[in-house]
Amino acid sequence: MLFWIVLAVVVVLALVALGVVGYGVLGAFGRLNRELEAAERDVRPLLEQAQATATRAAEVQGGRANSG
């Protein structure tokens, strides 16, 4: 009888521990997602500027090829 009580307590504690770990992992994924969105917002203007510069450089190269 005592064995079953101890086994039940061990199973309940294991489930609680797994729940805590799962909650922590899901919370970490949520924080990571928010950090990635914030980083994307921060980098977006730089990316757009780099694309505009690359487009302008291609236009200048095209102009030189046509005139030369």
Image (spheres, helix red, strand yellow):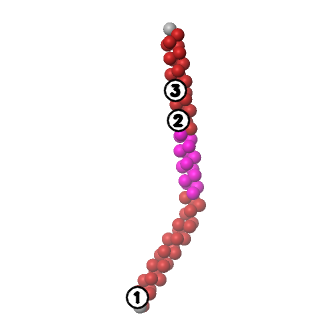
Give the residue at x 52% y 13%. 5
Give the residue at x 47% y 83%. 60
Separation (CA) of disc 3 from disc 2 = 10 Å
Q: Which residues are magenta?
A: 25-39
Comparing labels 1 and 3, the label whose residue is closer to the camera: 3
Q: Which numbered marker is on residue 2?
A: none
Q: Is residue 13 above or below residue 50?
A: above
Q: Is residue 55 above or below residue 10?
A: below
Quadrant of the image occupied by residue 45: bottom right
**Labels 3 and 2 touching (C-beta < 8 A):** no
Q: Is residue 43 above or below residue 61?
A: above
Give the residue at x 44% y 87%. 64
Separation (CA) of disc 1 from disc 2 = 62 Å
Q: Badge 3, how many Cα within 10 Å: few under 14, some, many 20+?
A: few
Report helix, strand or loop for mark 1: helix
The amino acid pointed to by label 1 is: Asn
Q: Badge 2, how many Cα within 10 Å: few under 14, some, many 20+?
A: few
- The verdict on residue 67 being magenta is no
Report helix, strand or loop for mark 2: helix
Find disc 3 in the rendering and name its residue.
15
The amino acid pointed to by label 2 is: Gly
- As drawn, the residue found furthest toward the top would be 1
Q: Which numbered marker is on residue 66?
A: 1
Q: Badge 1, how many Cα within 10 Å: few under 14, some, many 20+?
A: few
Marks 1 and 2, the one that precedes in the sequence? 2
The secondary structure making up most of the magenta span is: helix
Separation (CA) of disc 1 from disc 3 = 72 Å
Find disc 2 in the rendering and name its residue.
22
- Residue 9 at x, y = what percent? 54, 18
Report helix, strand or loop for mark 3: helix
